[in-house]
Amino acid sequence: MRSSMKLTTLLFLILVISSCQRPQGSDQAAQSLSTSQIRGQELTRIIENPVFVFNNAFNTRGTPYADIADLLADLGYNGIEHREVEGIFDLKKELDRKGLRIFADYLKIDIDREPHYLEDWKEAIPKLAGTDLILWVHVHSDKFEPSDQSADDILVPILQELADYASSYGIRIATYPHANLLVETAEDSYRIAERVNRENVGAIFNLTHFLWADQPENLEQLIKKITPRLMAVSIAGADRGDYETMHMNELIQPLGDGNYDVYRVVQLLLDHGYKGPIGFQCYQVPGEPAEFLRTSMNSWKKFKSIYESGTNWLSTEEISAGWELLFDGYSSTGWRGITMDEFPSFGWEILSGELRTVAMDGAESGNGGDVITTKEYADFELSWEWNMLTKGGNSGLKYYVKEELTSEGSYGYGLEYQILDDDNHPWMLEGKMSPNDYHTIGALYEFFAPSETKVVKPLGQWNTSRIVSHQNLVEHWLNGRKVLSYERGGKEFKEQLNKSKFKDIENFGQEERGHILLQDHGSQVYFRNVKIREL
């Protein structure tokens, strides 16, 4: 009878385990699953969106069209935006010479006046057949307030008439969201496209005016909604702050400048299937176009590299194997400050898909302090990438961490995978640390040294680390090589513990479960692709 009961219990457990394919225990696992489904395992992670610049990169400088075409081709752009009809065919001729194109053209509609837009467009549109041009419409009115939906009954027929005329020539129409104009938000642009109900009519997303006039906290929800109608996107470098009071130079910078995470915007667009053109806004950007357009292109190439490398996402196979993201690439979800309820408000930044410490003269927890996972882990396999940028810098990842509030401040007691610029660290230069001892990269700090065969990428390049901890057997890996293995709580471990500065910490490193900790040691170090699976 007992044997039968045991067999029944065993069969029940097998059924339960086999039915639970999804990782246990957190909303992040659900979020990871959703992300993978959006991107799709079959999706080739190559960004093919064409990129172009706004005409305002040049229009106050009187730059000849031939020079514009040459510069854009040299820097790797696919084309440019234009303003109204004048000069469009001269510009097109020079762009054709370099294999470039006009992606969009500014068209002003004033619903208060007749005619509503320049009649020249009726002659120009047939001559632009086959160019796939987007006429992005800036809608003006003195009679209606921005976003006033009662004006739709006037605007929609105007756009329908224009769209019907343009459709036979392959020209597309989209309303351009602009602060203080009638179509002020991307939500307005989407709504109007839905009401016009023509295949060649869509919506535009403009990051600058989104920050200015919309609700930035609704970014992901908005992108998910409007992407099926989205024809073009405008982005620029920007700063975070009180967007309603910020100035233009804070919201329009070369791509990559400013502390607003523009990569997150690009990532969300791509994740939701956007494949259209992306324009770089340049209004009143100071300096020479050759310089700020080169800066923007370099940043765009970095965005592409991050996205195409599969950073901060999980494949279907990884999810099936039980992996979950610990860092989603754009938020602090799943992390908090040591002995805190929230993530630190300073000392850490999330930019370009990276979780970054802000350098603070090498002081341990001298800025934002260490951050830990909200969840605790027992047996696990952990993988992450890190990039040390501070010469002689110091950091680390701790595991099986227990947090304490001591007389000297908050502290996380746990086993530390050492992250260090070995060659330039003061201890090494002063002879306090020998090459490859238990304080160097890959070591179990204060306990065991890594293998002498370890391979470390140079300062400023990304390294990949991995920890496997199963039934107290622990491995440290660095750039694909196992550099250390030990038994947690074993004889050698306890011998080293009794020699270390942690000897008086009760049960140090031998807890059944603990947090994962990223260290703020005053150095500038970036983390990404942090993922874990419980064993």
Image: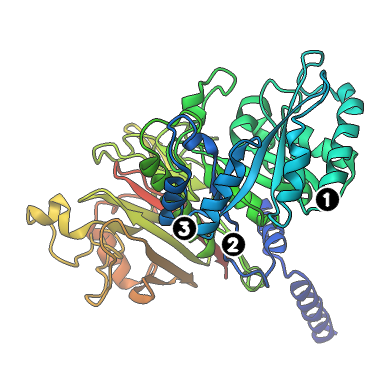
Q: Position of residue 176 (x, y in %)?
A: 70, 35
Q: Residue at x 67, y 71 (%)?
A: 41
First in residue order: circle 1 vs circle 3 = 1
Q: Is residue 407 left or right of residue 211?
A: left
Relative side of 444 to 251, left or right = left
**Which label's residue is closer to the chain start, 2 or 1?**
2
Q: Residues within 10 Å of mark 1 (few under 14, many from 20)?
A: some
Colouring convention used in this rendered image of the protein: rainbow
**In this view of the protein, which residue sits in the foreground, 310 or 280?**
280
Residue 285 lies, in percent from the top left, at 44, 31
Where residue 281 sits, quadrant-wise, is top right
- In the rendered image, residue 161, in percent from the top left (x then y), is placed at 89, 38
Seen in the picture, residue 261 relative to 11 is either above or below; the reply is: above
Under circle 2, the secondary element is loop
Helix, strand or loop for disc 1: helix
Q: Which residue is mark 1?
A: 167
Q: Which residue is the site of mark 2?
A: 48
Question: Callout 3: few (<14), some (14-19), or many (20+) C-alpha neighbours within 10 Å?
Answer: some
Mark 2 nearby-residue class (10 Å; few <14, some 14–19, many ≥20) = few
Mark 2 vs mark 1, foreground winner is 1
Query: From the viewer's perspective, is 244 left or right of 121?
Result: left
User: Residue 64 lies in what quarter of the image?
Assistant: top left
Residue in front for this viewpoint, 127 or 346: 127
Secondary structure under badge 3? loop
Find the distance from the CA under tag 1 to the CA under tag 3: 68 Å
Which mark is drawn over residue 511?
Answer: 3
Which residue type carries mark 1? Ser
Nearest the eye: 213 or 150 = 150
Residue type pointed to by label 3: Glu
Label 2, label 3: how many angstroms apart (C-alpha)?
48 Å
Q: State the separation of the CA atoms marked 2 and 1.
A: 25 Å
The C terminus lies in which quarter of the figure? bottom right
